[in-house]
Image (cartoon, helix red, strand yellow):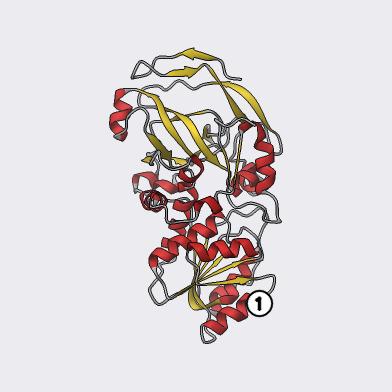
Amino acid sequence: MSTTTETPTSSGSATIPATMRAVVVHGPGDYRLEERPVPTPGPGELLLRTDAVGICASDLKCYHGAAKFWGDENRPAWAETDRIPGHEFVGTIVAGDEDALAKRKVSLGDRIACEQIVPCWECRYCLEGIYWMCNVHDMFGFKGYDGAMAEYVLVPTKALTHPVSSDLPGQVAAFAEPLSCAFHAVERGDIKFGDTVVIAGAGPIGLSAIAGTRQKNPLRIIALDVVPEKLELARKVGADIVINIAEEDAVARVKELTDGDGADVYIEATGHPSAVPQGLNLLRKLGTFVEYSVFKDNVSVDWSIISDDKELDVRGAHLGPHTWPAAIKLLESETLPMSEICTHQFALEDFQQALDLVGDSAGASVKVSIIPSRRS
């Protein structure tokens, strides 16, 4: 339990605890709830009381020891131990100096979301304005800075922040992170009015990509998944057609719907290796494949489909640059069925149960979040 002491802030009136409960990474499969000091904001920094933090598929893959995070013979480890995880978060500002508040045009008591990456602002990519590809690539909860699976989180001077309405439930406001990421994947697809767009996966990123694609208003949006309930959600966020790939041949059905040609754009949002060749096979010649997922396992495909057979445009998508305001606007419009998307919320003490639920292959959840103010 946190120990409360009187701590002055720029308003001189907030009561901030001396310690806080936090989940701490000790290595793959070894996350522990511990007592940690509440961070003290320095010049230009802000302290947030965490309202909610979502659990991402990448959090789970890091927990399970994926090479992308912990390294292998081809790459060094990127994730760090003794780090508080959690990069999908919103919080209420409880402390910060006048310069920090003025710079971000906020006040004590305002709610903000932080972009997951904390750019260095000095490398080649940052200097060219491509901050989301920063060479240093510090990121809340993984490397360089603690995340928000804790009662409080520090916002460093280099972080990017966005105001979010305090009227939204915390778990909905925190959904701005996956929604903005999916919006970027949609932008990478360069979708046109006459396109047939196929989105593989109706989890948080897939549903978000469907919602974002709906804003582009292409000819048809097709959603693929194996869970009937998620396909029904896909309809609610904007899919015109849904295909249960456990019951139908998605490639054949898409070609049937497109006079034998195939889809114009395919957005992969499952992280399952089988979804990659599926996309290559159902795209038309000169189609666009957008890959967003983080994979736990390596994927092998016939690259001649990309080159000699179809001359495909294959694009990656990473994070959510320049899409946060649009994502937040859509959430604040309250037009998405967020009560059905944000299915489960847990207390910090139940973080292991939350992680396990995200990893449940039966699809028992859609979006799982931790609410630090909740008690189990």
The residue closer to the viewer here, 231 or 183, is 231
- For the N terminus, the quadrant is top right
Q: Residue furthest top?
A: 6
Q: Residues within 10 Å of mark 1 (few under 14, many from 20)?
A: few
- For the C terminus, the quadrant is top right
Which element carries disc 1, helix, strand or loop? loop
Q: Residue at x 49, y 12 (%)?
A: 5
Residue 268 in view, yes or no: no
The residue closer to the viewer here, 365 or 28, is 365
Q: Residue at x 51, y 43 (%)?
A: 171
Residue 224 in view, yes or no: yes
11 left or right of 22? left
Residue 219's place in the image compared with 180, above or below, is below
Rendering coords of residue 104 (x, y %): 31, 34
Rendering coords of residue 226 (x, y %): 66, 65
The residue closer to the viewer here, 315 or 270, is 270
151 left or right of 301? left
Rendering coords of residue 284 (x, y %): 51, 79
Residue placed under numbered mark 1 in the picture: 249
Q: Amino acid at mark 1?
A: Asp
Q: Quadrant of residue 25?
A: top right
Q: For the image shown, how many numbered marks are present on the structure?
A: 1
Rendering coords of residue 370 (x, y %): 58, 38
